[in-house]
Image: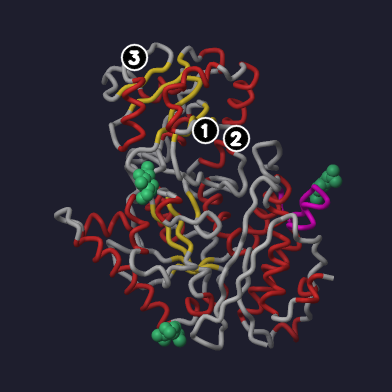
Amino acid sequence: METMEFRSPYLLLTFLVLSLTALYFSPLNQIHFSIKLSSSSSSSSSSTTSSSTPHQTQNPEPEPDTQIVPDHVKQTKSNTERIEEDLARARAAIRKAIVTKNFTSDRNEIYIPRGSVYRNPYAFHQSHIEMVKRFKIWAYKEGDLPMAHNGPTTYIYSIEGQFIFEMETRPSPFMAQHPDEAHAFFIPLSVSKITDYQFRPHHETFFHRLVRIFKDYIFVIADKYPYWNRSSGADHFMVSCHDWASRIERKNHKLYENFMKVLCNANTSEGFKPTRDVSIPEYNLKAFNLGPPRLGQPPDKRPILAFFAGAAHGDIRDILFKYWKDKDGEVQVYENLDKKKNYHGLMGQTKFCLCPSGSEVASPRVVEAMYAGCVPVLISDYYAVPFDDVLDWNKFSVQIPPKRIPEIKTILKGIPHKKYLKLQKRVMQVSRHFELNRPAKPFDVFHMVLHSVWLRRLNFRLPVAI
Ligand SMILES: *[C@@H]1O[C@H](CO)[C@@H](O)[C@H](O)[C@H]1NC(C)=O
Ligand SMILES: *[C@@H]1O[C@H](CO)[C@@H](O)[C@H](O)[C@H]1NC(C)=O
Ligand SMILES: *[C@@H]1O[C@H](CO)[C@@H](O)[C@H](O)[C@H]1NC(C)=O
């Protein structure tokens, strides 16, 4: 058997985890997962790298460490061992769900994911169940307001503050009481708030300050606690919607090599790695609102083929405006929408809502389109779409590469009505995963963000001292 050849325990573990990855991701989405773990006993990172395609891995054997361990034995175990055992049970449950095509839960399940919008609905459902049951996150207490433990809750970076509020302020049931029981660690800094307080006047030297604030924070917590060094940061994450979040990595690539960055600006050309990092949707929230208004009409009451209104940010919009601005009755593209017209109302009367990248890859229009029951049309380069591990975007959106902008009308008109109806129905179905609730509800966007972190955490193991 192939596994016998693995001598190092870490390689063997990596292999078992890869087996799960192989089952979890659809063959279309071949992920070459490789994560580096530093040995807990040495500060130099003695790393093991392994990669494999889903086709190469064999069916996994049931894991020995999922067996019930008697309590008296348990007490002698380290916290790290307990945490890893817990995650092993979760993996085993997910694997079982994939095989049996059903779930096991000790609660009443309010929603059962089914249908083609999910890459593997059984894996996702069980994984979500296990997450709700087990996942504990420690948010570091270090850092002061206003730049830590706080973030914007309105305007386009609002998901940053909404996440921090739901996680820490409420606080969330996912919050660990003690860092020893945590599976993952949250760095509660807000790039948007740092920008507000440190970036005046707008000047290039600001970036050094942003980089320093993050680096200092990481150094403090890595020095004070054992957790960062234990995983080289692989079970640590930050959340940001600000365009500049990716800049914290500048000149510190080694430090952040494994650190999970949960970002709106998921630009794969700027260092975003879909296997390590997490892409989250952008929301343009008004005060006291947790989402855009729902003004969607039924599919047969949508006379507009395509709609866009927004500012001329970035190259892609320049091209869009060149070909379509104020030119066509069916493809309606506006730079300045008449104040008397209702933006969300128009989306609700449109079949396909154009979501071109602006000065960053993500656009709040994706969520606005979903709330309006309008099929999102993604026009972007290098954009890693949100929740791609779980959702199959081809089933509820249209993707048009920027170079085909001149053909928008032909492409959209070429979609048969029956197919449009299917896409539209699925938009309504997946919109629950893009909803913000307070408190958060299972399967909503807060849970989807955490699930993305949970999934990445399931995909590696901490070295356990023997
Ligand atoms: C799936 O599991 C649920 C709960 O465990 C059970 O009620 C249901 O009958 C099962 N369905 C099938 C088709 O086995
Ligand atoms: C973690 O590693 C850094 C760099 O090697 C070191 O300075 C720090 O003291 C370590 N932290 C702990 C808690 O040992
Ligand atoms: C994504 O990153 C690349 C490389 O930095 C850049 O050229 C491109 O403009 C970025 N995309 C957006 C929409 O910002």
Q: Residue 106 lies in magenta, yes or no?
A: yes
Query: What type is the residue that disc 2 sits on?
Result: Asn
Question: Which image quadrant is residue 40 in?
Answer: bottom right
Mark seen at residue 327? 3
**Mark before the other along the chain sequence, 3 or 2:** 3
Question: Which image quadrant is residue 205 in?
Answer: bottom left
Residue under the image location 70 percent in, 46 percent down: 120
Disc 3 Cβ-to-ligand 3 distance below 8 Å: no
Which residue range is magenta in the image?
A: 94-108
Q: Return the residue at label 1.
A: 399
**Mark before the other along the chain sequence, 2 or 1:** 2
Query: What secondary structure is found at the residue carrying circle 3?
Result: loop
Q: Residue 33: percent from the left, percent from the top?
A: 61, 61
Q: Residues within 10 Å of mark 1 (few under 14, many from 20)?
A: some
Mark seen at residue 394? 2
Q: Residue 180: percent from the left, percent from the top?
A: 55, 77
Q: Is residue 124 above or below residue 56?
A: above
Disc 2 Cβ-to-ligand 3 distance below 8 Å: no
